[in-house]
Image (tube, helix red, strand yellow):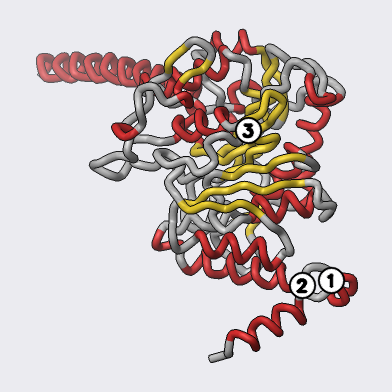
């Protein structure tokens, strides 16, 4: 076992400016490599401390955190902070604030920042009930909160411990409800509460949240759409996470849709990107995928144009801008496939919300036809029997 001083000397050696200038942040890359490997080994324990780097890269490249305050209230091992600093080219223009609820993961994040030469105010605590940065309003919020937290527990996630007058539950003049068995919408409101008036939030969410019809969850989604806060929705393929094969989506909420902060006015518009066909297996893996650099840039460039220049051209099966009114007419569903359409080559392009009622109707018609055919056959058989 190494003595503490030996470890300190090794870290200084591998993290020295001379080595960084020659090979880049080699020690940081080594640390991230072992975090990724460890996350795969811990997958059976539903470990949530490590977000795949291609997903982190996508969120960072989309919202472009190059100055100001970055906040992650479910920061895990701190990958969002490290990638944000990389995007800002290590110019020390970002301030990092985070919170992590798991005592095991909390020191991993602090070590990750230290190894990359970053400083941040990282606190230990549960963001639902014990927010450690109550007055913080961030320029950028990047997060991968736990999917559907509370859904598998008889106790839920702790809805009863959120005060009825909690300011996070107010959007405009509306007081919003929360699901006792699913914390997804709690996270959305938490992110929104901590955004500056010109801020942008990008976060990972379970795909089901795009169209879930549970009364209270639909109410939150409806309120976000009606308040014109949903800027972009990206649906991704499955198999991107080591600990779950389910597909995920990315939400981008913005308070600068009126044109503040140097961006164009895009009120009443929502950019939909369907990335279900993107991603390839990680070399050496038979089940986990990652987005390529080119795919990450394809998603980011579409959003960049949407925010800065104008609506990107519609691309069937991948990209389209829909109006808020159109989304309202579709029952406030945010599934990208519903709006971008399909290339016509793959039946899987059709969103489940559209495919299910169509297939149900087809099945009903076929069962009715089968019943009529069965009756006709029986009549014919009776005729044969009577003739005998």
Q: Name the residue located 23 percent from the left edge and 42 percent from the top edge.
A: 154
Q: Is label 2 in a helix, a strand or a loop?
A: helix
> Is residue 277 depicted above or below 12 in this figure?
above
Disc 1 packing (10 Å; few <14; some 14–19; many ≥20) = few
Compute the Cα span from label 3 to label 2. Answer: 33 Å
Q: Which mark is residue 26?
A: 2
In the rendered structure, are the residues bearing label 1 and label 2 in contact, judged by CB atoms less than 8 Å apart?
yes
Q: Name the residue located 87 percent from the left edge and 23 percent from the top edge.
A: 309
Q: Place residue 110 in its image quadrant.
A: bottom right
Q: Name the residue located 25 percent from the left edge and 14 percent from the top edge.
A: 376
Q: Is residue 239 left or right of residue 257?
A: left
Give the residue at mark 1.
20
Compute the Cα span from label 1 to label 2. Answer: 7 Å
Q: Is label 1 in a helix, a strand or a loop?
A: helix
Q: Which mark is residue 137?
A: 3
Q: Is residue 305 left or right of residue 376?
A: right
Residue 351 x, y percent position in the rendering: 54, 27
Q: Nearer the viewer, mark 3 or mark 1?
A: 3
Residue 37 x, y percent position in the rendering: 57, 69
Question: 245 or 231, which is in the foreground?
Answer: 231
Residue 66 x, y percent position in the rendering: 80, 42
Q: Name the residue located 69 percent from the left edge and 29 percent from the top edge.
A: 199
């Amino acid at each position: 076992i190494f003595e503490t001083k030996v470890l300190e000397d090794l870290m200084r050696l591998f993290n020295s400016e001379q080595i960084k200038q020659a090979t880049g942040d080699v020690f940081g890359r080594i640390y991230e490599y072992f975090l990724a490997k460890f996350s795969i080994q811990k997958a059976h324990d539903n470990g949530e401390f490590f977000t795949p780097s291609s997903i982190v890269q996508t969120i960072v490249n989309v919202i472009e955190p190059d100055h100001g305050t970055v906040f992650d209230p479910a920061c895990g091992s701190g990958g969002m902070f490290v990638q944000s600093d990389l995007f800002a080219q290590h110019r020390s223009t970002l301030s990092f604030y985070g919170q992590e609820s798991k005592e095991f993961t909390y020191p991993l994040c602090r070590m990750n920042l230290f190894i990359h030469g970053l400083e941040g105010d990282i606190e230990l605590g549960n963001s639902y009930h014990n927010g450690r940065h109550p007055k913080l309003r961030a320029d950028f919020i990047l997060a991968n909160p736990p999917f559907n937290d509370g859904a598998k527990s008889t106790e839920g996630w702790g809805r009863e411990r959120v005060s009825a007058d909690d300011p996070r539950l107010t959007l405009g003049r509306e007081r919003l409800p929360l699901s006792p068995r699913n914390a997804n919408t709690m996270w959305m409101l938490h992110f929104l509460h901590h955004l500056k008036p010109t801020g942008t939030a990008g976060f990972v969410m379970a795909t089901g949240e795009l169209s879930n019809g549970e009364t209270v969850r639909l109410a939150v989604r409806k309120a976000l759409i009606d308040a014109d806060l949903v800027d972009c929705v990206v649906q991704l393929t499955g198999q991107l996470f080591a600990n779950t094969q389910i597909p995920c989506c990315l939400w981008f909420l913005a308070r600068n849709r009126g044109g503040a902060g140097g961006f164009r006015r895009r009120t009443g518009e929502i950019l939909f990107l369907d990335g279900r066909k993107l991603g390839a297996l990680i070399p050496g893996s038979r089940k986990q995928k990652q987005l390529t650099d080119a795919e990450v840039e394809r998603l980011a460039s579409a959003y960049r144009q949407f925010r800065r220049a104008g609506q990107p051209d519609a691309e069937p099966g991948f990209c389209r801008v829909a109006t808020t009114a159109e989304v309202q007419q579709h029952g406030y569903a945010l599934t990208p496939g519903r709006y971008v359409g399909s290339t016509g080559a793959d039946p899987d392009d059709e969103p489940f919300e559209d495919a299910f009622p169509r297939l149900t109707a087809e099945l009903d018609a076929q069962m009715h036809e089968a019943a009529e055919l069965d009756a006709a056959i029986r009549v014919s058989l009776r005729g044969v029997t009577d003739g005998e």
